[in-house]
Structure formats: C-alpha cells, structure tokens
Amino acid sequence: MTTAITTWVDGAAGSGFDVDHLPYGVFARSGEHPRVAVRIGDFVLDLSIVAAADMVDTHALFDQPTLNPFMSAGPAVWDSTRAWITGLLTDETERDLVEPALSPVDSVRMLMPFTVGDYVDFYASEHHASNVGRMFRPDAEPLLPNWKHLPVGYHGRSGTVVVSGTDVVRPSGQRKAPTDEAPTYGPSQRLDIEAELGFVVGVPSAMGDRIGTADFARHTFGVVGLNDWSARDIQAWEYVPLGPFLGKSFATSISAWVTPLAALGAAWTDLPGQDDPEVLDYLRVDGPAGLDIEVEVVLDGEVVARPPYRTMYWSPAQMLAHTTVNGASVRTGDLWGSGTISGTEQDQRGSLLELSWGGKEPFTAGGRERTFLEDGDEVVLRYSAPSTGGGRITLGEVAGRILPAR
C-alpha cells in the first residue's frame, strides 16, 4: 500500500503519519480507561470504538490497556487490521463511522504501549564499539575477538523501561576514578544517552526452540525509538568482569508509538558487509537485512548528532536469532535494543561519551561547551525512514528530562 491512496483525514496526507505508516499506541483521557489507538496525522484513532461499531471480529483486542493481546495475535491479524484501518481512512464513505473516534493527539495522554517482558540490549554498531575500544584500550585492537562473530548483548531491566516524556532521576552508585584509591558513593557525574532502535516481539516462542533469521518477521511486531540512559562512571567501575548492571538499569526510554514492520517495507537495505570473517550459518541472512533509518539527537533543542542506522553491523534478525540459539524463549512484549547507533563521522555519534571522546573533547551545544548530561537537560531522539509512498515516515520520538539525584 502506498500514499497514492489518499486519506480524507485533514492534514494527514503527505505527513510522516500518513496511511503508509499507521503506528500503534495506547492512550487515555481523564476518567477513561486506557485503550489501543493508531495514529493518523495529528490525530489518534480509537480502535476500540470504531472496531466495535464496525463489528470487527477482533474488536476485543483494542479495548485493552496494552498492545500485548494484539501483538500476540500474529501476522495474519496484523495484516488484516492494517488493511481494515487503511480502508477506513481512505474511503470517504467511512467518514461518519470514523470521525467520532478521532481525537487530536495533543488532547490525550500517551501511555506505555506494551507490557515489557524481557529486555535485552545489544552492541551492534561497529563504529560505536570501535570508538569505545579506542577510548578505553588505546594500545590494543578496538574490537574484542568475539565482536564480529556474534552480536554482543546483555540482559537489562524491563521494570525500568518507561514511555517517552517520563523524567529520569540522576542515578547514584559506586564510582572510582583511576587515580582514586577506593570507590566512593554518590550521584553519577558522567550521565549519558544511547540513541538506539528497539524491536518488539509479537509472537512468542517455546523454550528449547530457536528462531532463525528467516523467521524474524513472523515473531517481530514492530519498532520503537529507544534511549538507553547510561551512567558511565558507575558502569566503568562495575562492568568487569560480568558487564553492565546499575550503570544501565535505572532507566530506558521508548517511544509511545510502535511502528509496525509493514510500514518499513521501503527501508530495508543491505548490511555493510560480514565477509571478514564470515558469520556462522545460524546468523546468515538472505537479502537486505539492515534498515535505512535516520536518527537525530537533540540536546536542549539543538541537534548535536545524526546517527544513521543503516551503518549497523548486526541486523535485528541476527540479534533475535542469537538471543534464541541456545533455546531461550521469547515472550510477547520482549524488547531488544540495537545498542548505540553511530556512524563514521564525528557528528554521527549516538552517545555523549563519543561526542566528547570520554569527556576530553567537549562539543558545543546551546552556545557552550558540553560533555555529559546536566540536571535539567532534555534529550529528544527523532527518527525517520523511507516510506512505501516515496516520502518519509516519522517514527515516534523519545524524550526525557534529567532530574537531580534524590
């Protein structure tokens, strides 16, 4: 489906939220229970109302406080629902049915779109991993020996995944500078962002089964913007030998809108190359497996970086395959992050750690030099991708403001 089919909704045609996008979310108004909506232009369409009025068999899936029941229904239901919504929004004869269920997006409160099961964060950008390696291991190879053989990741904390717009309290913990004799406790002084893309599981798998790369679309419902806030000083002291813990677990922000995979048909692109070394068989992919998604990192109203997701070394299908290759199951609502998205250029770095080169090379934002996040800072991540109609769709943004430590 393309934007050659014109929507009758005022202002939606040609926008980043036209009928070639149709992302899903959960909304509420004062005194009303949360329920599922789809976005069209600057409006939310209450699917629970219109599905009941249109006597759609799956109407109960939309009168829910979370997308999980709909996501678990599988690709056939996802596809038929998308076709039904597209028809409603492009057929003038449906206007009387649909208009009562439309509300301006700024008149409602957007909530967590799904209940998060498990959360896994990867380290899939070769440029980000190489930058970090050069900073912390200047006399050694930037990438560790396993990096190009498997998608490196760690299990995060699903209970602190929050929706865009939620404030983030500066975390406290143990910190130890190289020159300190012993660790101290206190608020993080090197608070950072990680501009990422998140992927959401729809159809679960059984323990003991594996999901191959070819089955990615059968299990994956859609994509969210993701900011994995990071306390670099806490992380640096704790991560050896088992990896990130308190430096990452205090907050991860995601967009309120979930873009279905069907909206990204024009965004698939070839991976940069995995022929030296060749990947093992279970990680092989056929055809385009990367995504041409542009990201903007906005700090206090100023764009400070534009990381391109198309440069990522490991694809989402490979990350899912690796997650389950040992027989681990996935559940509806499981979320995995791509890890920081960074490109080859300085203005394509998706973390302040890289932008300031470990705090040693301040960058300029708002007319002054910056390194890590300060109390009161607001970070917004914006995303866009090519659309099937020839323009661009606008994925849900991710925003958060830093509050002082408690």
Image (cartoon, grey):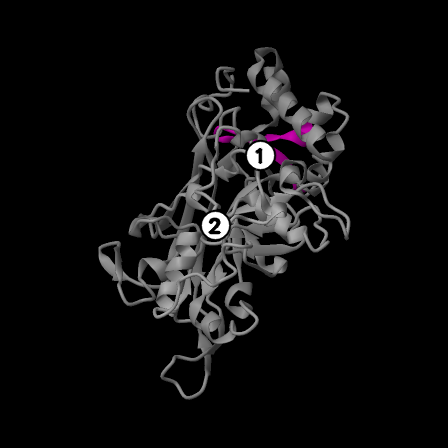
* Image height of 94 relative to 131, above or below: above
Q: Which residues are magenta?
A: 33-49
- Nearer to me, 75 or 54: 75
Q: Are marks 2 and 1 in contact (CB under 8 Å)?
A: no
Q: Residue at x 47, y 72 (%)?
A: 234
Q: Is residue 143 left or right of residue 289?
A: left
145 relative to 281, above or below: below
Residue identified by numbered label 2: 196
| Residue 375 in sight | no
Mark 2 closeness class: few <14, some 14–19, many ≥20 residues within 10 Å:
many
Q: Residue at x 59, y 46 (%)?
A: 283
Outermost residue, bottom direction?
A: 181
Which labelled disc corresponds to residue 261?
1
- How far, Cα to Cα, is label 2 from label 1? 17 Å
Question: Residue 85 appears at what percent x and percent y?
Answer: 62, 23
Q: Amino acid at mark 2?
A: Glu
Reply above or below: 12 against 275. Answer: above
Does the magenta run of residues contain 115? no
Give the numbered dot on residue 81. none
Kind of element beneath mark 1: helix
34 is within the stretch colored magenta = yes
Q: Residues within 10 Å of mark 1 (few under 14, many from 20)?
A: some
Closer to the camera in the image, 138 or 165: 138
Residue at 60 percent across and 40 percent down: it is 29
Quadrant position of residue 309 = top left
Residue farthest along the left direction in this orientation: 367
